[in-house]
């Protein structure tokens, strides 16, 4: 494969990786928004649930949106997408969203952390589905806000990378 076609393949992978991650986050946002905002906007929550909704929303914006996504996940996704531009393989391009989320082709510790987070999130989703509707609204509302901030953060870091500013997190690629 020539240098130009190699780099073109890398760009395809980078765009697919970032777009795929944004697509996964957006799918969750779209699916959870009616659950997280519907009962709140319809006035169906008790005063305690409304207060819990507001507190949980603030907590999730800070912990999930700012600390989790903006400071860690989003810059790593973009750094790994940028690394893919210069070093694409057929596998990393085809599975670029998973590659950008460091689910493979990363140091062992990063892969373990990434998979544990993914499994933990799935387990939390299953548990939250068991909550009564009002309390599920509380949890889902905060999650929607955190995921929305996370999606905006991925777009922010990607735009900065395109403008020439390297992401503030390393790509965490395997040695060698």
Image (cartoon, helix red, strand yellow):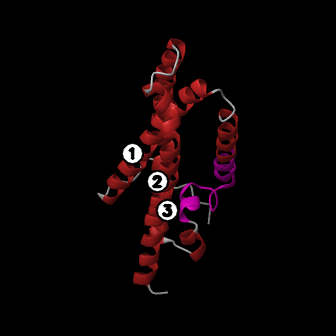
User: What secondary structure is marked by label 3?
Assistant: helix
Magenta stretch: includes residue 112: yes
Residue tagged by mark 2?
22
Task: Specify which label sits upstream in the sequence, 3 or 2.
Answer: 3
Indicate the quadrant containing the C terminus: top left, top right, bottom left or bottom right: bottom right
Q: Nearer the viewer, residue 84 or 151?
A: 151
Q: Quadrant of residue 136?
A: top right
Which mark, residue 122?
Answer: none
Query: Where is residue 94 drawn, in percent x and y?
Result: 56, 71
Would you place residue 123 above or below residue 106 in this image? above
Q: Quadrant of residue 134?
A: top right
Which mark, residue 152?
Answer: 1
Q: Quadrant of residue 127?
A: top right
User: What secondary structure is marked by label 2?
Assistant: helix
Q: Which residues are magenta?
A: 96-116
Would you place residue 49 above or below residue 146 in this image? above
Mark 2: few, some, or many residues within 10 Å (few <14, many ≥20)? many
Q: Residue furthest left?
A: 163
Q: Nearer the viewer, residue 171 or 129?
A: 129
User: What secondary structure is marked by label 1?
Assistant: helix
Q: Nearer the viewer, mark 3 or mark 2?
A: 2
Task: Tell me the residue at 52%/53% (across/down).
Answer: 24
Query: Where is residue 159 drawn, in percent x and y?
Result: 33, 54
Residue tagged by mark 3?
17
Magenta stretch: includes residue 76: no
Task: Tell me the residue at 43%/41% (across/down).
Answer: 148
Q: CA distance from mark 1 to mark 3?
A: 16 Å
Query: Where is residue 80 drawn, in percent x and y?
Result: 50, 59
Query: Dominant secondary structure of the magenta stretch?
Result: helix
């Amino acid at each position: 494969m020539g240098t130009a076609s190699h780099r073109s393949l890398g760009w395809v992978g980078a765009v697919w990786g970032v777009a795929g991650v944004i697509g996964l986050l957006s799918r969750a946002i779209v699916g959870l928004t009616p659950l997280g905002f519907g009962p709140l906007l319809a006035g169906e929550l008790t005063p305690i649930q409304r207060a819990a909704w507001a507190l949980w929303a603030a907590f999730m914006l800070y912990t999930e949106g700012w600390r989790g996504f903006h400071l860690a996940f989003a810059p790593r996704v973009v750094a790994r997408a940028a690394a893919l531009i210069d070093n694409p393989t057929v596998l990393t391009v085809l599975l670029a969203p998973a590659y950008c989320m460091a689910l493979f082709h990363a140091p062992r510790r990063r892969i373990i952390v990434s998979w544990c987070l993914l499994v933990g999130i799935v387990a939390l989703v299953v548990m939250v589905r068991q909550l009564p509707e009002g309390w599920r609204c509380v949890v889902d509302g905060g999650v929607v806000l955190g995921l929305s901030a996370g999606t905006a953060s991925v777009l922010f870091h990607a735009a900065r990378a395109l403008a020439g500013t390297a992401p503030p997190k390393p790509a965490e690629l395997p040695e060698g």
